């Protein structure tokens, strides 16, 4: 049962939060003692931080650090290591390289695979699309790093295909790479919010005469619904066309480690690149993201050398040659410490518990007349609409928004709001093993109470 005294955050408005935080940025000639600073932070900031450890937090992909991960992160913070180069951290650079090799084996990627740590899944997706463009340029006979988009005979012919439910970071990437949104073609999804393969093939046939598909992006766990696109047939289509296949597994890839879910991810080993965010369900501190490539030599397209740093021909490992940041945190340590502390048995339990909670909640809700389930959950996300009997269809979007706004303002639990097929829907996320089916059902009960209040007040 929920403790009525515990709030997952203050519920304050943006104006109230800003007013509370104002004293923190009143920089002065004289500093504060650590004791006084701690008191100020506890009073002014901490009430407005989200309590990810509470089972009532059911809205996003965040969780508190796992004990082993926190232990590793403390060491990393104490030594404050930059890890992109052997010169700045021999141990850090080597551990990152070894961790990347071990992760490739853990996810059963080909022996030729390699990986690099990134700041977040957004940057991992961006780099993957850059690599796809680079390879496309090589197929056209020029070096993309030297000539860029003008090297293509007609850059407007280049298109990237992805699901209409793909993460918005894909749109960010094509903007930042100079492609423009005209190069993004979104694919229809089936009833379970996965890419519709039949419609994808029709789209490919329609594009053949006027466009060149340089990349297809599949999602292994979409942000809104957690659905896993059918990777294997998408991989076969990519190979047939000579297009790069990137799998955005930022949210869902970890679930491929579970035997019961592994078939959903069939074909991921054929992808040219795959992104993953351990800082989601594994509970390692942010930032902690990884980009895998099927052929380690693909990272050579990212390599830049300098006179003082990452000099050409150096035999030592320099992870910074695989991705742009020349300074970034020692993220591998918290992940390694977490996996060693938990062991694979506990890791599987951690991953499986929230999936089971969502599945059970879906099973319990599917026969309830005032709840419309929007999909069958592949992973740990469930989208639904509250639909009271005889409630006007044209008012349902407003009802979902009302429920979301009130729950957020109360500060006692959280869920999120998204849109599917132009309809507002409520979204439950179980990322932490602390989120039980009972906690999810209590949220649905709260939704019902608020819906009844909406009807009673006519708001």
Image (cartoon, helix red, strand yellow):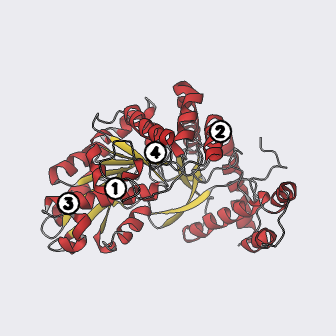
Report the residue that reaches farthest toward the front: 308
Sooner in the amino-acid sequence: mark 4 or mark 2: 4
Mark 2 or 1: the one toward you: 1
Of labels 3 and 1, earlier in sequence is 1
| Residue that badge 3 annotates | 136
3D distance between C-alphas at marks 3 and 2: 46 Å
Disc 3: CA contacts within 10 A as few (<14), some (14-19) or many (>=20): many
How far apart in space, not on screen, are marks 2 and 1 (Cα)? Answer: 36 Å
Instruction: Name the side, left or right, on which 142 lies relative to 58.
Output: left
Q: Is residue 223 above or below residue 456?
A: above
Which residue is identified by label 1? 128
**x and y percentages locating residue 441 in the rendered image:** 66, 44
Quadrant position of residue 357: top right
**What residue sits right under mark 2 in the picture?**
436
The residues tagged by marks 3 and 1 sit, at their Cα atoms, a distance apart of: 12 Å
The quarter holding residue 204 reads: bottom left
């Amino acid at each position: 049962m929920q403790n009525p005294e515990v709030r997952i955050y203050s519920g304050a408005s943006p104006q109230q939060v800003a007013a509370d935080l104002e004293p923190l940025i009143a920089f002065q000639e004289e500093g504060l003692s650590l004791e006084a600073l701690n008191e100020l932070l506890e009073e002014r900031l901490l009430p407005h931080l989200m309590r990810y450890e509470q089972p009532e937090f059911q809205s996003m992909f965040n969780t508190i650090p796992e004990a082993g991960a926190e232990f590793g992160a403390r060491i990393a913070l104490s030594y404050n290591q930059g890890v992109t180069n052997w010169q700045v951290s021999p141990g850090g650079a080597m551990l990152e390289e070894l961790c990347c090799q071990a992760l490739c084996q853990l996810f059963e990627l080909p022996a030729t695979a390699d990986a690099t740590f990134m700041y977040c899944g957004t940057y991992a997706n961006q780099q993957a699309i850059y690599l796809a463009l680079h390879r496309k340029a090589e197929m056209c006979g020029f070096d993309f790093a030297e000539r860029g988009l003008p090297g293509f005979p007609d850059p407007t012919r280049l298109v990237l295909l992805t699901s209409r439910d793909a993460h918005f970071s894909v749109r960010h990437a094509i903007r930042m790479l100079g492609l423009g949104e005209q190069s993004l073609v979104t694919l229809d999804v089936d009833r379970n919010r996965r890419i519709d393969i039949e419609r994808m093939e029709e789209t490919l046939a329609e594009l053949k005469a006027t466009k060149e598909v340089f990349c297809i992006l599949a999602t292994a766990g979409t942000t809104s619904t957690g659905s896993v696109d059918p990777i294997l047939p998408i991989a076969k289509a990519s190979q047939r066309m000579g297009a790069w296949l990137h799998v955005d597994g930022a949210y869902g890839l970890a679930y491929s480690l579970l035997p019961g879910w592994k078939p959903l991810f069939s074909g991921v080993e054929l992808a040219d690149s795959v992104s993953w965010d351990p800082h989601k369900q594994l509970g390692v501190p942010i930032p902690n993201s990884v980009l895998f490539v099927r052929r380690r030599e693909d990272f050579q397209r990212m390599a830049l050398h300098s006179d003082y740093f990452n000099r050409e021909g150096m035999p030592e490992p320099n992870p910074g040659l695989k991705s742009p940041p020349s300074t970034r945190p020692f993220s591998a340590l918290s992940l390694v410490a977490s996996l060693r502390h938990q062991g694979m048995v506990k890791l599987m339990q951690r991953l499986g518990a929230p999936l089971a909670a969502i599945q059970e909640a879906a099973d319990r809700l599917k026969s309830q007349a005032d709840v419309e389930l929007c999909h069958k959950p592949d992973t740990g996300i469930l989208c639904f609409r509250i639909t009271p009997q005889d409630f006007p269809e044209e008012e349902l979007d407003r009802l979902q928004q009302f429920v979301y706004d009130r729950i957020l303002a109360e500060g006692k639990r959280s869920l999120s709001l998204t849109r599917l097929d132009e309809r507002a829907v409520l979204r439950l996320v179980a990322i932490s093993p602390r989120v039980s089916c009972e906690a999810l059902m209590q949220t649905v009960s709260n939704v019902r109470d608020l819906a009844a209040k909406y009807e009673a007040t006519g708001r």
